[in-house]
Image (cartoon, grey):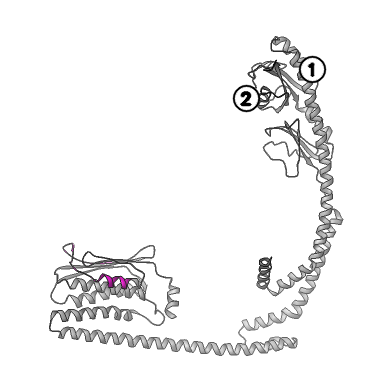
Amino acid sequence: MQNVLRRIAEAFRKVGFRGRILAVMIAAGAPGVVFGAMEANRTFNGAIAQRTAAAEAVGDRVASRLDEVIAGGSQVLSTLARLTPMGAGDDRCATVMQAAVDGAERYATAGRLAADGRVTCASSGEGAITFAGARWFEDLSRGATVAVSALQREPLEGESVLLVGAPIRRGSDFDGAVYLSLRRDWLATALRQEIGATVRGVAVYDQKGALITSVAAEGPDILADGAVAPPADAIVTWVGGGALRVVVLPKQGRVILGLQSLLSVAAPLLAVAFTALVVWGALQIWLLNWFQRLHARVEAGAPSTVMSLEGAPPEFQSLGEAFDRTMDSARERQAALVQAAEDNKALTRDLHHHVKNNLQVLISLLSRQQKRARTDDARRAVAESRCRTLAIALVHRFLDPPEHLGVIDLDAYLAELARQAHATLFNNGRRARLLMEIDPAVSPVTRASTAGLMLTEIFIAGAAADANDLSIHVRWSELESGASELAVSMEIDGAPVEAEPDSDLLRQIARQAGAEPVIGPGARLFARFAPPAPEAETQKAAQS
């Protein structure tokens, strides 16, 4: 209950002012509406009870009539079974069956069946018909004294629709059966006499749900289609020990509720609607109109809202003055924030300029020191330091602060870094061919610097091998999934250069960008980078 109340309170806070007033009006008129609905429900239930009682009475009459038909048929079948035992000739049997049909208007055909279900004689002369496998015949063979079913094949003579069967026994053994089929027109007439004008229609089905016949009191016969289920308000009665199902459709009146039931619901609704309309108009004129004027004045960017509240109550004029003071304070605060942002951008540009220049000075000093070094080991150590510093300095060179502080052109950065590292490490007369396949890409600074440092470490390891006629291959690929791949290799005649990169350092560098490198054999490196964050998130992270 507390959760429900909390959700109602949250929904109430989300709606506008008009919605809240309307909700209050609805809550005020809810008791009258509920009382009217209860009165209408009582009237409706009374009408339903009367209609149901009338339909149940019709169902009982139809069930009684069908029980009489089945009982009468059972008596006739007992006589036929006694007069036409299985030893009797077919001519005599057919004569007896025809006499039974002629003696009662309700019957269409009569016949005798052998124990295998084959018709041995019949009033219609159809001796080739068999009922083997029919449910009613199987029930008789298992001990039933009477069976009722709809015909499951082409109708017999006289458009028969209902079949009543009884067994022929020799002692305790099943020796066959006799049957009678009722005429469709007679059964329909009998049903119509019973239903009168109190229901819409009546239908009779067998145990399997097959339609035997249906009668409509007026209008279309909606039960004539046996494949369509009866409506939900239908009343069902079983006849003959569950052999037949009688479905009755109650009659629907044109006006179920009546004028009194309608007024009991409509009157409180009209009262609530009228009250809500009056309150709505009063709020619009005396309250919401001034808020709308204030809103329009603010949207237009007017420096003051007092002019729009001329003639308003004193409370609204005081509100307008307080709002003007708040807006002036907000404008001053916004101007201060804009100026602070511009100062921050200028400071960022200046800081970036100094860092870039200092790194360039440091690289120049390392280059000069490399030339002055007296031993190969010293020159190599200085060259390695120069390449590692170069990987960071070029990042600042390709940055464009402050608008693009978080991303750089990765293809230009890697290409320039590879060329300068190649010139720095292989300037001692060794032949080393540099091949680059770099896809155009814009990358975050962290990924770019990680890729540059990893490339530099492989170059340093390959240069330390003192090999000649090298082929250096640098490849950066942008995949359709958004991921990226870096591959660096140094080979001599297709075989990797025997080198030992610092694998621990490479893995530590790769973790900064969330990559896991594959190192070796020799001076080889492969690393896959996950898709970067969206550009908006990258810019936001850089600005923060």
Query: What's under tag 1, amino acid-wise?
Result: Asp
Alpha carbons under labels 1 and 2: distance apart = 29 Å
Q: Say whether residue 303 is visible.
A: no
In depth, the one of 49 and 365 nearer the eye is: 49
Crowdedness near tag 2: few (<14), some (14–19) or many (≥20) residues, C-alpha within 10 Å: few
In this rendering, the answer to whether 201 lies above or below 475 is: above
* Residue 507, image quadrant: bottom left
Q: Quadrant of the C terminus?
A: bottom left
In this rendering, the answer to whether 365 lies above or below 29 is: below
Image position of 255 (left or right of 7) = right
Image position of 319 (left or right of 357) = right
- Does 194 appear in magenta? no
Q: Secondary structure at mark 2?
A: loop
* Residue 242, image quadrant: top right
Q: Quadrant of the N terminus?
A: bottom right
Q: Say whether residue 526 is visible.
A: yes
Identify the residue at image location x=14%, y=77%: 428
Q: Position of residue 469 (x, y in %)?
A: 14, 68
- Span shown in magenta: 487-510
In this rendering, the answer to whether 116 lies above or below 377 is: above
The residue where tag 1 is placed is: 102
Query: What's under tag 2, amino acid-wise?
Result: Gly
Q: Position of residue 291 (x, y in %)?
A: 69, 81
In this rendering, the answer to whether 293 lies above or below 51 is: below
- Does 501 appear in magenta? yes
In depth, the one of 426 and 239 nearer the eye is: 239
Identify the residue at image location x=69%, y=17%: 172
Image position of 16 (left or right of 507) = right
In depth, the one of 544 and 143 nearer the eye is: 143
- Residue 133 got which mark? 2
